[in-house]
Amino acid sequence: MKKMDLTALLNGNPYPGRGIVLGRSADGRSAFVAYMIMGRSVNSRNRVFVGQPDGGIITKAFDESKVVDPSLIIYTPVRVPAQGTWIVTNGDQTDTVDAFLKEGKTFEEALRTRCFEPDAPNFTPRISGLVEVKDGRLCYRLAISKSDNGNGDSVQRIFWEYEQPVAGEGHFLHTYSGDGNPLPSFEGEPELVAVGDDFDAFTEGIWESLNAENKISLFTAQINLATGAAVRTLIHNKNV
């Protein structure tokens, strides 16, 4: 698979929807994590990311008076249940994965209990990631639960595991392949993207490359591979 420029991918897609980027910095010392959300409706755009004590985030309504349906827009995208373990998803399956891990079960077992979102005719995929840093080693997983070509009666669950991520490389998984009505679900493998050393450049590159009208919020984290601790986390909100 050809390694792509993440900013070019984002600039070329007006509506990737919600997206996860996981990767290893070019110097091999850090894991980089990104989670982004976009929106077309007033309800979807009425959100901000709010940091949490564990290092993760929640979504929150920017203007409570404008909330129409909170069920698919208010959730916990990022949890850090233990040092070196990061759960990143585009919905309340974050809580499912967290609960299963605490019971000694797996990321995959958790997501086999979940389906795509009940928002016909889009049937938005559930995308999920798990980052694990232990003893200086990085492993991450990505998963998607999507409809079978828009068939709301058929779910496809696909998992990817990256046990030895290469320095300077990451993977980008997002909900939609582009804009449309209905919105076309992501197809294929997570996109292989280049990751540099500069965390600020990584963050700003994503934020500035997202479609200005549709972007809502971005969260990024830099994790020290030697210790598993977060070095820095950043939040960008369009609504301020």
Image: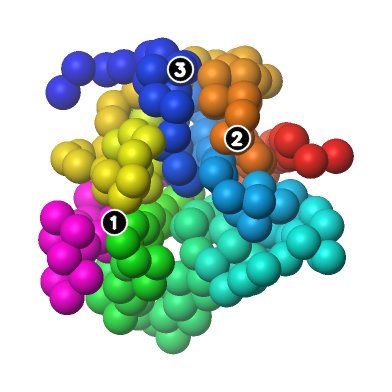
Question: Which numbered disc flags the more N-terminal residue, 2 or 3?
Answer: 3
Q: Which one is in front, 168 or 89?
A: 89
Residue occupying image coordinates x 71% and y 52%: 47
Mark 2 to mark 1: distance in Å? 21 Å
Of label 2 and label 1, which has the lower sequence position? 1
Q: Is the magenta stretch mostly helix, strand or loop?
A: strand
Q: Which amino acid does label 3 sit on?
A: Asn
Element marked by disc 2: strand
The residue sitting at 34% across, 39% down in the picture is: 180
Position of 177 relative to 132 (above/below): above
Tell me which corner region of the image, top left, top right, bottom left or bottom right, holds residue 6: top left
Q: Nearer the viewer, mark 1 or mark 3?
A: 3
Q: Is residue 127 magenta?
A: no
Residue that badge 3 annotates: 11
Residue 215's disc is 2
User: Of helix, strand and loop, which one carries label 3?
Assistant: helix
Mark 2 belongs to which amino acid?
Answer: Lys
